[in-house]
Each structure stands twice: as C-alpha cells, then as structure tokens.
C-alpha cells in the first residue's frame, strides 16, 4: 500500500451484506491491508445461504449443493477442511406430461429427459469456449460474423422454443418445462435460452453433470459450516440488524447512511445485495437507465423452495410442469421414524404456502394421492425484503443486458454477489464467491496503483458504527 513518513496509509472499504460474496470480499480486502466495515440487514450472516434446524434436520433454506467442478466454492471447501456427501439417488420417478401422470424408474425418466436437454444446449460449445469468460467470442477477432450473429440472437424467446420448433410432443415439452420451471425459479415463458446454454458449458455440455453439480452433493456441516468458517477469518465487526438506506459516492469517497440515520464514510463501497433488494438503497448518483430498468424488471426468480416430510420411505424424484405448485422434487433424508424428507422447487412463490401441510399435500397429490404429508417448511425469499427473489436466474434478453451491467464499474461504488458472477451466475454459491474475490481484488489493485487517489480523510462530524 502507499506509504508516507514510514507509516502505512490504509484505505477503508464498506461492505454491504454478509452473504458469501460480502464475507469473501471482506476477507480479501483485510488480507491486503484494507480496513473494512460490514453492514448486514438481517440478524444473521449467510445471505441466501441459510442452514436452519427444522423438522429434526439441519435444512438449507436457500443454497444447498456444491461440487468439485465449481472452482471457487471448492477452493473454500478445501481451505476450511469441509466435507461433502451425496444426496440419495432416487430409484422411483413420478412425472406429469400432457395431463397424464407417469411412474417409472429415474433412469427411465432420464432417458426421455436428457435428449431434451441436449436440444436446449445446442450451440453451447460454440458460444462458450471459455465458460468463465462468457463474452469471449464477442471480443475474439477470429469469431466469424455468422457465429456472432447467432450468438447475439440466441437470447430471445423462451428456453423451450427450440423444442416446440422441432416438433417435440407435449409430454416431452412438459417434462422440460418441469425442469426449467424449478431450475430457473420462474416461468419458462420468460426464462433465458442463453442462460441454459451457459449452464451447459459450465457442466461440460452434459445434462447429467449439470444435475450432479446442482443437485448432487451437500456439505456435511451445511452451508453454515462454510460461511461461519469464512466469517471467523474476518477481523472486522459484522454489524447485524444494520440496514443501509443510502449511498452517496463521489470522486473522493463514499458516504453511507444507515437506516437509523448513522453515517459512515470510506474510500469505496462494495454492495452485495441481490437485484431484487437494490430498490431498498437510495444511490447517489443514481444507477444509469439500463441498470435501473434491470432493477425494476427483476430477474426470473419468483419461485420457491420447500421441504416436505411424508410418511414412509420414498426413494423418489418427481417432475411436473410449471403450472403446478412444485415442479421438481427429490428425496434428501430418511428418518428413523419411517418418514422421508423431500426438497422441492416451484416456479411461483404464491402458488403454495410453504408452512401449510394442506397446501403441501395438494401439491403432492399431483403425482400420487398415496403420499401423506406430515410437515413442511421453507422461506419465502421473494417476499423477503432483503432478497426480493430466490437465486438470480435470467429472463430472456438479460444475458446481454442484465447482470453484466454491474461489472466493470470504475466509480467508488462496486457490486458483487452471485447475481453478477461471470461463471455460475446466480444459481450456486460458486458465483457469489467468484464475484466477491474479483471485486475486492480489483479494488486492491486500484488502491495500490493510486487510481482512486489517496485514502479518504476522516470527517470528525461523521459517526461510524463500531
């Protein structure tokens, strides 16, 4: 860092949000000698990753699965000596197509489903030769005009249009709709086709590997074991129950006003709140028009995640189109009391009451009335003021004019989080960690190069939260 009179001059950064991205950003900044203040609106750390003890288990209310092919989260798993274990593989599958309910083995279901994914993934190898650099071919002078034209046109329409155009049956389209309604956490009619192809590229263009990365392996100590480990390496106080109301950023520094009126000042600020919660912070200068449009429009993530306990042992998976309360479901835990805990995902958070056994029973009846629901739970992330969405899946058109609008910013206001990741954008913790690291390290480089000027002089009239 810059030095004067043999005394180190320290920069100071405020981090808004104590989810994975905020925690990792704070750790990176402190390691480089930057002073950090962290403000978190909730009464806990973790953000949209939240391990909570319910129904006799440590259940993940938000982010759940990890994988060794997710480079950033795997590095943290290795760093903190966390262990993983496999979710159970279902033997029986239930699915609904063209208004008819089917039962078979999961392997039989996958034989129908994976060719549909292969069709949806078409173009992924050409479009994403380097998956963690999603716009590579835009900047590669050797990209042919024909490929560039197809690339720029690929994020229009619905993720399922390619199946309809190719004449797939309604049963097959309904099966694909089941997956993408649950995976995109919203209606497939607005789900980005390009997002699906990017996920494919991050999974070696294989549907089975995509499933393994996003539904296959959990942390033995839960997400809590990982985010608390990261937090333990941070020296700064993590101020909980401390919402940020306004941020003013100028050429010389940032002024952050908390909900209680307290003001804090720093050389820069990293905001890690999701797209759906950015409306809670007044920014000055305001976001540009394209950024404001994205915040108003929101992501495709208006769905839900629910945990359901049923009587008996059911090694099962289930799928139903997005007009049903739950689109995807699989078994996760088998109790000694002869019960099974299932985890499910739906496209509309208002279509099911996450805490109502009656509502959950009605959802399960779509596949079979033999299931007996005894308990259910979940967290409505869309209704949650501090998230306003589940994970940040993209609407059609947002791949090129969405998440990327918040990267490469050269003011003292920076954004980080899963919503802004270049790799696993939105869907898994890996993207949050990636964005936290890259945003923090860029600030460090700019501080060291003197690109952001000298550290901000303290204002004696300013009150800083301890």
Image: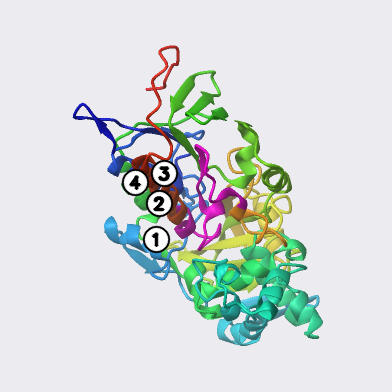
Tell me the distance, in whole angstroms, between the alpha carbons under discs 1 and 4.
14 Å
> Is 103 within the magenta?
no
Residue 197 vertical placement versus 414 (above, below): below
Q: Residue at (43%, 52%) from the top-left corner?
A: 438
- Going from N to C along the chain, the mark reached first, 4 or 2, is 4
User: What range of the chain is rendered magenta?
Assistant: 405-432
What residue is pinned by disc 4? Answer: 28
Query: Decide: marks 1, 4 in contact (CB < 8 A)?
Result: no
Q: Which mark is residue 443?
A: 3
Tell me the distance, in whole angstroms, between the alpha carbons under discs 1 and 3.
19 Å
User: Is 154 or 197 nearer to us in this picture?
Assistant: 154
Query: Decide: marks 1, 2 in contact (CB < 8 A)?
Result: yes
Q: Quadrant of the N terminus?
A: top left
Mark 4 Cα-neighbour bin, 10 Å: few <14, some 14–19, many ≥20: many
- Going from N to C along the chain, the mark reached first, 3 or 4, is 4
What residue is pinned by disc 2? Answer: 437
Tell me the distance, in whole angstroms, between the alpha carbons under discs 3 and 2.
10 Å
Tell me the distance, in whole angstroms, between the alpha carbons under discs 3 and 4.
10 Å
């Amino acid at each position: 860092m810059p030095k004067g009179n043999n005394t180190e001059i320290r920069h100071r950064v405020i981090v808004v949000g104590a989810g994975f991205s905020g925690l990792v950003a704070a750790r990176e900044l402190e390691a480089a000698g930057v002073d950090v203040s962290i403000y978190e609106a909730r009464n806990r750390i973790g953000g949209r990753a939240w391990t909570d003890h319910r129904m006799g288990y440590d259940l993940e209310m938000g982010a759940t699965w990890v994988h060794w092919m997710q480079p950033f989260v795997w590095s943290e798993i290795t760093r903190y000596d966390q262990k993983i274990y496999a979710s159970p593989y279902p033997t029986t599958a239930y699915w609904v197509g063209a208004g008819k309910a089917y039962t078979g083995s999961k392997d039989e279901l996958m034989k129908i489903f994976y060719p549909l994914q292969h069709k949806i993934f078409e173009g992924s190898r050409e479009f994403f030769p380097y998956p963690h650099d999603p716009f590579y071919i835009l900047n590669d002078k050797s990209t042919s005009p024909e490929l560039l034209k197809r690339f720029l046109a690929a994020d229009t329409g619905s993720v399922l249009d390619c199946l309809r155009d190719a004449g797939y049956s309604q049963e097959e389209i309904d099966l694909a709709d089941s997956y993408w309604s649950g995976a995109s956490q919203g209606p497939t009619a607005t789900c980005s086709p390009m997002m699906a192809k990017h996920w494919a590229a991050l999974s070696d263009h294989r549907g089975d590997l995509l499933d393994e990365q996003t539904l296959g392996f959990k942390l033995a100590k839960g997400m809590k074991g990982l985010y608390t480990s990261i937090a333990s390496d941070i020296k700064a106080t993590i101020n909980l129950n401390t919402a940020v109301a306004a941020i003013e950023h100028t050429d010389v520094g940032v002024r952050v006003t908390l909900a209680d009126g307290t003001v804090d000042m720093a050389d820069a600020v990293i905001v890690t709140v999701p797209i759906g919660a950015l409306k809670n912070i007044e920014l000055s200068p305001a976001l540009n028009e394209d950024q404001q449009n994205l915040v108003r429009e929101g992501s495709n993530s208006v769905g839900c995640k629910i945990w359901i306990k049923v009587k008996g042992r059911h090694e099962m998976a289930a799928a139903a189109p997005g007009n049903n309360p739950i689109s995807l479901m699989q078994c996760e835990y088998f109790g000694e009391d002869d019960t099974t805990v299932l985890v499910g995902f739906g496209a509309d958070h208002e279509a099911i009451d996450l805490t109502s056994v009656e509502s959950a029973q009605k959802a399960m009846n779509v596949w079979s009335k033999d299931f007996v629901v005894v308990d259910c739970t979940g967290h409505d992330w869309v209704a949650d003021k501090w998230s306003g969405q589940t994970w940040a899946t993209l609407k059609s058109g947002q791949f090129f004019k969405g998440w990327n609008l918040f990267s490469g910013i050269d003011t003292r206001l920076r954004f980080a989080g899963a919503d802004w990741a270049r790799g696993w954008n939105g869907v898994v913790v890996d993207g949050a960690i990636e964005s936290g690291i890259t945003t923090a390290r860029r600030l460090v480089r700019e501080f060291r190069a003197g690109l952001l000027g000298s550290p901000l002089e303290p204002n004696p009239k300013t009150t800083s939260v301890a």
